[in-house]
Amino acid sequence: MISVIGYHTTKFGELWNKSLYDLVGEVIRGVLKDAKLEKEHCDAIFIGNMLGGVLENNLHSGAKVAEILDTHIPVFHVESACASGGIAFNMAVNYITAGKAHTVIVVGAEKMTDFPPDVTISGLSAAASGDEQEVGLTFPGLYAMLARVYMETYGYTEEDLAYVSVKNHYHGFLNEYAHFRKQITIEDVLKSPYVASPLKVLDSSPISDGASALIISSNHQLVAQAKYVAKILSSEVATDSISLKSRKRLDELLATKIAADKAFDQAKIDRKDISVAELHDCFSIAELLAMEDLGFWKKGTAGKRIKEYETMHGNGNGFIVNTSGGLKAAGHPVGATGVKQIGEVYLQLTGRAGKRQVKKSRYGLAHNVGGSGGTAVVTILGN
Amino acid sequence: MISVIGYHTTKFGELWNKSLYDLVGEVIRGVLKDAKLEKEHCDAIFIGNMLGGVLENNLHSGAKVAEILDTHIPVFHVESACASGGIAFNMAVNYITAGKAHTVIVVGAEKMTDFPPDVTISGLSAAASGDEQEVGLTFPGLYAMLARVYMETYGYTEEDLAYVSVKNHYHGFLNEYAHFRKQITIEDVLKSPYVASPLKVLDSSPISDGASALIISSNHQLVAQAKYVAKILSSEVATDSISLKSRKRLDELLATKIAADKAFDQAKIDRKDISVAELHDCFSIAELLAMEDLGFWKKGTAGKRIKEYETMHGNGNGFIVNTSGGLKAAGHPVGATGVKQIGEVYLQLTGRAGKRQVKKSRYGLAHNVGGSGGTAVVTILGN
């Protein structure tokens, strides 16, 4: 059994006075402190980062992290677009399972706000297919098409999508590490300008800087000594065709469904056992699709059920979604997001989520997506 | 036990009529054919690529490969500069060891010649430290400093380095997939223009396009059916500070030493058991350092021993180095190199290396380096 025994995150937002490796160094030091460990306890490091190469000609982070830590242990850089953090976690779990390490640091980091927005957005489009890039389809455009299909297939309106953002901004208001800590209303969302119709600014996650780190371990002694422990019950990955045009259905992300089925099988628990989940709400539509594709809500019902706010903190139905604020309000430094999601679930399961703590959380799930659904990672923790 | 059961590579060189994913698709189809398998036999894919993001805004290769293959299996993109291919192989081995897959395709691919050389070289400098980038230190400059230290410490000349290139060009002459198939002389090397003194054009590996793929498997039935099998005895990784200024010694690459010691321990064989090795000769000096750091030759002696051509094909001393032509003559499409190295060792161990076949090869080693030694991967195969 492998457990999470430590977590640290920077605040997400516009962190103009810190470089990518300032953030990486900060969270590695922070997570070692949180777990009360020294670097010598750790056998390897996995780092998820998407845009270092594209935006600042900054690659080979393995050796750069080795220099920060003055170490010779293996350090692996992985990239799967916005799922880079979740994939780094998945690979770290497998690395321990393979017997190559007992204790591993997982880092997710991204620096996005130092560049003009069009440069960052162009960089993000590296995750899309060549055809989609050529016709100028950015991620808002791709998710707008998914939203349009969903709304037309199941008869929903832009207002139905807006509830996701209102809920997640409330959670961001409760989270001191969130990029946006401002509550918003349905009217605010509907009044905000279109990014790609039907998606508006307040349907969309922001461009953020930030880094997050976890320590995971199979070392019985370290786990026994650790004050805050959550067990990793499963971490599973699936892929799908990068292009929307190559997919059979556009009212779902098939990679999410496949990864979720594998993850629940592996964890040997039911959907109803989950009390907290961090879902990949890069746009409001994405949380609705995820709620259905993960099997929490029946296909086509999310646009209705979201309006009951049953997954909002304080509503007491026993299943709260995106307590961190999600990508929408906590922010979306792409490489960091997947690690932060698992970190938030870990905080919830260990009773350390402060104002956004969900009572009696026994099982939690994190769902991280790359691109418009080309990669999905589903991770389940328990305590 | 995990075995290599198939290999395919494109020719390395200036492949202007093929895109990055043309090359990836070609080697995946080719390796499936070589192993006589269908894609349905494979549970996951690992792809090593360094510059897709930097040079052509092309990331998220997991989902792009999924689209080529019309599959939903996990596809992982890893990046460790020029060690990206070796790291992809290492992670694939660990993934199987972890029980997450039985059979995995490992792809290394790079497209470098579609861009002006200064653009590609600037992209390559993404693997160096920020300080080194800022002062304009490209990789020829970094390795030139290592060469200078080595030559001055042990009393060698530029001519002593040149023997590496002459030997490896002879091997490239024998390899129909090599970028350069032209034999050269010591005089040719010495007459070639300086890139960064004391290193000259003919001390340096070229900028190349290319892709290579392996299939590795723990499936007893598939391995038993396979015509050509080499066992993976070990694959080990170490890191070092990215900056030369942070290292204690500059007459060695410490990451290579650490990875090699771990790999020989794991494989339970001696240095003298190795009959073929593919070493990371990005510059002539790098092969000399590697021969010493891997423990084949005593520190400080490589500049002398290389002149006896004892590691050149046909010289019959039972240990031949860089039969593919090495990075120098076979070419260096950075993400592909680490996969091609292991593929060459596999061809040698299975008697399929054609004109460059080394007799009675029982054990072989591949050594892949990232940057100026920030990452090293050492892999040992046996049959």
Image (tube, coloured by chain):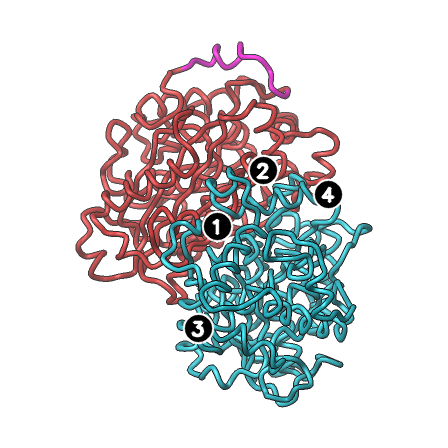
Chain colours: A red, B cyan
Label 2 to label 1: alpha-carbon separation: 15 Å
Q: Earlier in the sequence, mark 2 or mark 1?
A: 2
Check the residue under mark 4 and report the chain it is in: B
Q: Is residue A31 left or right of residue A111?
A: left
Tag 4 secondary structure: loop
Tags 2 and 1 both on a single chain: yes
Q: Tag on residue B115?
A: 4
Q: Quadrant of the C terminus of chain B?
A: bottom right
Q: Specify start and end residues of the magenta stretch as a single range.
A: A184-196
* Residue type, numbered disc 3: Lys
* Residue type, numbered disc 4: Phe
* Residue type, numbered disc 2: Val
Q: Is residue A9 left or right of residue B337?
A: left
Q: Is residue A329 magenta?
A: no
Label 3 to label 1: alpha-carbon separation: 31 Å
The answer to whether marks 2 and 4 mark residues whose Cβ atoms lie closer than 8 Å is no
Q: Is residue B18 left or right of residue B77?
A: right
Q: Tag on residue B299?
A: 3
Disc 3 vs disc 2: which is toward the camera?
3
Give the image location of residue B53, x and y in percent. Answer: 61, 42
Q: Which residue is mark 2?
A: A54
Q: Residues within 10 Å of mark 2 (few under 14, many from 20)?
A: many
Check the residue under mark 1 and report the chain it is in: A
Give the image location of residue A372, x and y in percent. Answer: 60, 37
Label 4 to label 3: alpha-carbon separation: 39 Å
Q: Is residue A190 magenta?
A: yes
Tag 2 secondary structure: helix
